[in-house]
Image (cartoon, coloured by chain):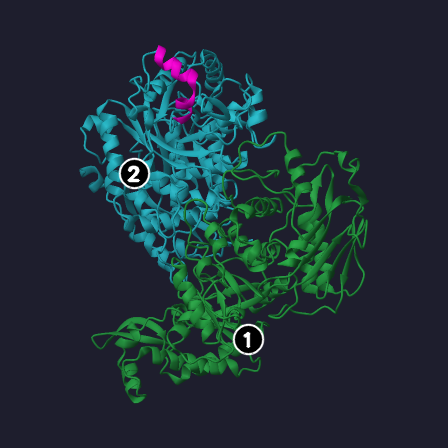
Chain colours: A green, B cyan
Amino acid sequence: MTLNQRYAYHGTLVLLFAVLHFSQAGHPYVTASVGQPWPRPQMVQPGEGFLVVRPQTFKFQITSHDCDILQKAIKRYEGIMFAAPRAPKREFHAQWSKGANFQGYLDTLSVQLMTKCEDLPHPDMDEQYEIKIDSPDFPGVGKIIGQSIWGILRGLETFSQILVPTGDAFTVNSTQIMDFPRFSFRGLMIDTARHYLPLSKIEETLDLMAMSKFNVLHWHMVDDQSFPYVSKAFPSISKLGSWTPSQIYTAEDISGIIEYARFRGIRVLPEFDTPGHTQSWGVSQPGLLTTCYTNNTANGKFGPIDPTNEANYEFLKKFFTEVTALFPDHYVHLGGDEVNFDCWKSNPNITTFMVVNNITGDYAKLEEYYITKLLDIVANLPTKNGYFVWQEVFDNGVNIANDTVVHIWKNYKDPSVVKNELSKVTAAGYRTVMSAPWYLNYIQYGIDWYKYYEFDPQDFDGSEEQKRLVMGGEACIWGEYVDATNLTPRLWPRASVVAEKLWSSADHTNSTTQASPRLEEHRCRMLKRGYDAEPLWPSYCDVSYD
Amino acid sequence: MTLNQRYAYHGTLVLLFAVLHFSQAGHPYVTASVGQPWPRPQMVQPGEGFLVVRPQTFKFQITSHDCDILQKAIKRYEGIMFAAPRAPKREFHAQWSKGANFQGYLDTLSVQLMTKCEDLPHPDMDEQYEIKIDSPDFPGVGKIIGQSIWGILRGLETFSQILVPTGDAFTVNSTQIMDFPRFSFRGLMIDTARHYLPLSKIEETLDLMAMSKFNVLHWHMVDDQSFPYVSKAFPSISKLGSWTPSQIYTAEDISGIIEYARFRGIRVLPEFDTPGHTQSWGVSQPGLLTTCYTNNTANGKFGPIDPTNEANYEFLKKFFTEVTALFPDHYVHLGGDEVNFDCWKSNPNITTFMVVNNITGDYAKLEEYYITKLLDIVANLPTKNGYFVWQEVFDNGVNIANDTVVHIWKNYKDPSVVKNELSKVTAAGYRTVMSAPWYLNYIQYGIDWYKYYEFDPQDFDGSEEQKRLVMGGEACIWGEYVDATNLTPRLWPRASVVAEKLWSSADHTNSTTQASPRLEEHRCRMLKRGYDAEPLWPSYCDVSYD
């Protein structure tokens, strides 16, 4: 890695500040770094000097293309940098201007967007950016340069993270940063079915995602337990299937979230999981779910969607037409996980249907029959969406289209089985997104993030071509034991660990020891910005409490 | 249990309300009870009717003794009952006054305190109370009766929990409740050394403790990692040992917490753990900690307090004189856990001391030497305190005074070992408090409260006399991975499970199935009152989000 070696990463100067920061500090498990960004940029070339940023006089200056996303971002970052809700109380120290390495004041940061703003973040968006602070080619000044608005957003976040509070101002080291993501898909999945999440919590999650350069919010919106999505075509589903009349998401609510995400360069990938995980759909839709039988008598229970009922495909077509019109992303997640065959097996109409169709006893084939029809419906909608499915659809041998993305989630306890799945899926030519090691809802006592950091989604037996089919990964926080009360501390900073693994280069993310001081700083950064990111170990953050 | 059978507990009427509450409700794992208090009262005799409480006209009326604690409590409960921060939006329903069982309006609740208020909650306080709502002897009216102010506080909490919101008013069933705690010591331990907890978080914890009828806050204030206690006699300990200059507790802060707790009938038991767990003490106190050696050379590390240095006992006397004057409780917790002998073994001065004292090689004896001197110091302070020690002090055969309370905490994974320890400690005639099964910091995925509920601290081999030596128990939330960001959701409702086990009778706390709907209601109650108690399973609470 010649390029990386040339842009050697070191932090002698910033570490000096860490030591001076307090005259006291108890006995923390790990001492936070100072002014080190998370996730770690691809290439950093530090200089010798530093500039001073004075909040009163500092300004961003847009020197090329401009748009609403950029305007709003600049406003947002001024607040983040200079008015963090829990920033420690400031004392004035004059030392910073006296050092030999003081290179002057950074009063203007040029923001140079090289192409016209795109409207919406998308799967192939360019997130590359450069930061130059008092660089050899531009001494004494500062710049963020990006080919696309999405890169500029990532650069602004990095810039906000390399400022170091000093007295009533900030210092920023002379540096050149060239940065871009390792993977194009860096997702976080939330589940609003096991518990409702209020819109303000989803927005907070998007803020925190932007801090760690995540770019996809996967919204597992409905499930067996509840159906908060208010469908215009089928309003009775949420009327009978939501937890309460107010624990719902209207089209307007959803568009608000998509807009909030767009301004942060984050796509929203909706999931409407079928044919299993649909109990809450059934209450209002007679005939949608399979009637379960005991001894050839309907027992009052219901199973997955009834694949033999033609009317159900009409329903699905109408439903997904609405959903894909509402969510602008190219992709929709169609689920397909954990289809329980017991109810299908008990139902005499399904048995007859399978006889007629010559698939007697082969319930995976029945599932394939359903999935194939569903994929066909979705692929032929006016929006021509692509789709994600959970890995069972592939595992069960369903004949899926080439551009399907297979989402791997099973066997988190056994990385070798997960790697084997990666080999199989990519050998079959499918693109894939990895979630198995990153189910953050599985909590345990103690430091549990090392294992998240140690899993590499391209470390499996396969050709270079196969490796390229790994689009990225996704941290998941399933909602059985999570709601607005504990979402934020349970997710952060644990999700940030996955974010760095997906953004930074493989050879910069192979040491938890090296990552620890930066992760500690990142968690304190979240705390300072007002978010309840939980502690990683015995430690402290220099924040001011109410 | 004849008495309990007579006062049979049932809830047909209130369960009816549960069903009517929503026309929809997804598929919750457990449906909450309605108007059922937590912890479960000892005896409840429900009547047939109900009264209606109208917030606009309802008043508490003090009919006997009065004091500042009572005045403040009444004001507090008016807020809790009628202005809970996240109470659902109200709609007016007139049905309640039309039912045949409507017995009228409860416009006044008499609060009848039978004796003069005590100033401070104490180990032998009387917490018994009665509630009569439209009872046969007092039809149409309501009363809370208590022999002591502490019972009145518990009764007010219960009353606030049996009100059921209906339209813009509340209903309360005709009922008689006679209630008292099973154990006199019902504690919760917080740790402000591994992470600092701001005062507002400790106050919130006290609010939540009062909701579950806990009566002791055990404050593990300092430890290896930090020393936030500002000692007047030794100000340099916190100057050099706290995390930051603002992450401290002054005498004024502490008195404020003790006062806040007093108004809720909660004692504050301070812990200053020695001779181990004292790294943070050492920085400012040369000679206090044992110098560790490698190959007979001091290696720059320090161990437990040096028991051979006579000056250290002068220090401890002065320190505990100050502490026991500040904390009014009869008891002080002296720690004594996890003393690592390695550093003592390495130190040549200690070896010489042990030779001279004829205890060569017996480090438990050296620990005994220290503890005996410390207990002697504390027992002879002007405040004549009693003391708690962690179980190792007993296990290591230290000769401790008869009135020592032995705090059991080890082997949480093996209840049989814990029960054996109970047998041994009580057979030796010591009183004990149980924490081993209730280390709430040990988290795991899924429903983990069943095991907390299934442990009974009197279920061990021993005589009736031995059983009576069990003063109660304590839930502990050690702070390695806990701070202000996650304390509340991690503690609640899990700590409430321990609270009910310690308050309610053994034969009313032997079924997690029966407890589940009430626990679900209790967690929603906390949420409505504005506290972030986390979910127990897939479910919902009828709360209004920002």
Query: Mark 1 falls on what kind of element?
Result: helix
Query: Quarter-wise, where is residue B123 in the image?
Result: top left
Crowding at label 2, few (<14), some or many (≥20) Cα neighbours within 10 Å? many
Q: Amino acid at mark 2?
A: Ser
Looking at the rendering, the stretch of residues picked out in magenta corresponds to: B342-356
Q: In the image, are marks 2 and 1 on the same chain?
A: no
Q: Which quadrant is home to the N terminus of chain B?
A: top left
Q: Would residue B118 be seen by someone viewing this image from the given angle?
A: no
**Residue count near mark 1 (Cα–Cα under 10 Å), binned few <14, some 14–19, many ≥20:** many
Q: Chain of mark 2?
A: B
Query: Which SS does the magenta portion mostly show?
Result: helix
Along the horizontal axis of the image, is B161 left or right of A526? left
The disc placed on residue B504 is 2
Q: Viewer-proximal residue, A127 or B154? A: A127
Residue at the image position 33 percent from the left and 54 percent from the top: B15
Q: What's the residue type where badge 1 is placed?
A: Thr
- What is the C-alpha distance between the residues marked 2 and 1? 54 Å
Q: Which residue is label 1 attached to?
A: A324
Residue B54 drawn above or below residue B75:
below
Q: Nearer the viewer, residue B401 or A457?
A: A457
- Residue drawn where x is 72% and y is 68% of the image: A117
Counting from the top left corner in percent of width and height, residue A528 is at 62, 44
Element at badge 2? Answer: loop
Q: Residue at x 57, y 73 (%)?
A: A326
Residue B295 screen position, x and y as percent? 45, 24
